Image (cartoon, grey):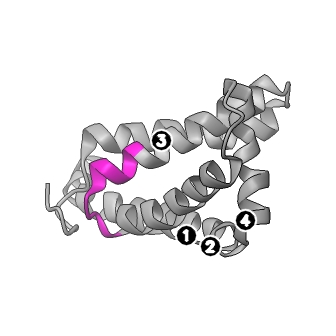
């Protein structure tokens, strides 16, 4: 009985998830974004695992931007589906690259989990407490 009455707080739960996860991505992405071309090049080198060897600075910048911009949009529930696509793709690529490098479960499990979270939000939507209000 008590647990079933909690379902009326579904939208609050979605808001809580969006705010915390979005803020974490902005917090993590800000040093990447402000790190400049040297940081972007190192980050963009991950594309080599897909056989893409050109423009690592561009790819690194795009990954950093997806963290900051995507995290902000995700937290606000604004253009949520676009934000989740950007973030799911970035985290999916990070998962693939870490698996490709033979990293342990401890290394690749976090980006894999975030890929699932963002993909789920793609289907669930932002909830009532968002700018998208879907």
Q: Nearer the viewer, mark 1 or mark 4?
A: 4
Instruction: Determine whether label 1 and label 4 are within 8 Å by CB.
Output: no
Which is more toward the observer, 13 or 90?
Answer: 90
Q: Which residue is mark 2?
A: 30
Q: Which residue is mark 3?
A: 88
Question: N-terminal of the two: label 1 or label 4?
Answer: 1
Question: N-terminal of the two: label 4 or label 2?
Answer: 2
Instruction: Determine whether label 2 and label 1 are within 8 Å by CB.
Output: yes
Q: How would you rate the neighbour count of disc 2 (Cα within 10 Å): few for under 14, some for 14-19, many for 20 or more? A: some
Q: How would you rate the neighbour count of disc 1 (Cα within 10 Å): few for under 14, some for 14-19, many for 20 or more? A: many
Magenta segment, prevailing SS (helix, strand or loop):
helix
Q: For residue 27, what is the image quadrant?
A: bottom right
Instruction: Determine whether label 3 and label 2 are within 8 Å by CB.
Output: no
For image coordinates 58% across by 53% down, the residue present is 63
| Label 1 – label 3 distance at C-alpha | 15 Å
Percent across and percent down for residue 54 are 68, 39
Which mark is drawn over residue 26? 1
For image coordinates 66% across by 30% down, the residue present is 52
| Label 3 – label 2 distance at C-alpha | 18 Å
| Label 4 – label 2 distance at C-alpha | 14 Å
Instruction: Determine whether label 4 and label 2 are within 8 Å by CB.
Output: no
With 5 as the anchor, is 3 left or right in this view? right
Q: For residue 8, what is the image quadrant?
A: bottom left
Q: Which residue is mark 4?
A: 37
Question: N-terminal of the two: label 4 or label 3?
Answer: 4
| Label 1 – label 4 distance at C-alpha | 19 Å
Q: Secondary structure at mark 2?
A: helix
Which is more toward the observer, 97 or 20?
Answer: 97
């Amino acid at each position: 009985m008590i647990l079933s009455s909690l379902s009326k707080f579904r939208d609050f739960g979605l808001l809580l998830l969006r705010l915390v996860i979005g803020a974490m991505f902005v917090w993590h992405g800000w040093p990447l974004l402000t790190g400049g071309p040297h940081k972007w090049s190192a980050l963009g080198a991950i594309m080599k695992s897909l056989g893409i060897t050109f423009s690592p600075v561009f790819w690194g910048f795009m990954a950093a931007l997806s963290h900051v911009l995507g995290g902000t949009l995700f937290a606000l529930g604004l253009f949520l589906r676009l934000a989740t696509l950007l973030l799911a793709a970035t985290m999916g690529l990070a998962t693939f690259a870490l698996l490709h490098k033979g990293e342990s479960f401890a290394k690749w499990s976090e980006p894999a989990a975030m890929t699932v979270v963002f993909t789920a939000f793609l289907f669930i939507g932002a909830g009532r407490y968002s700018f998208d209000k879907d």
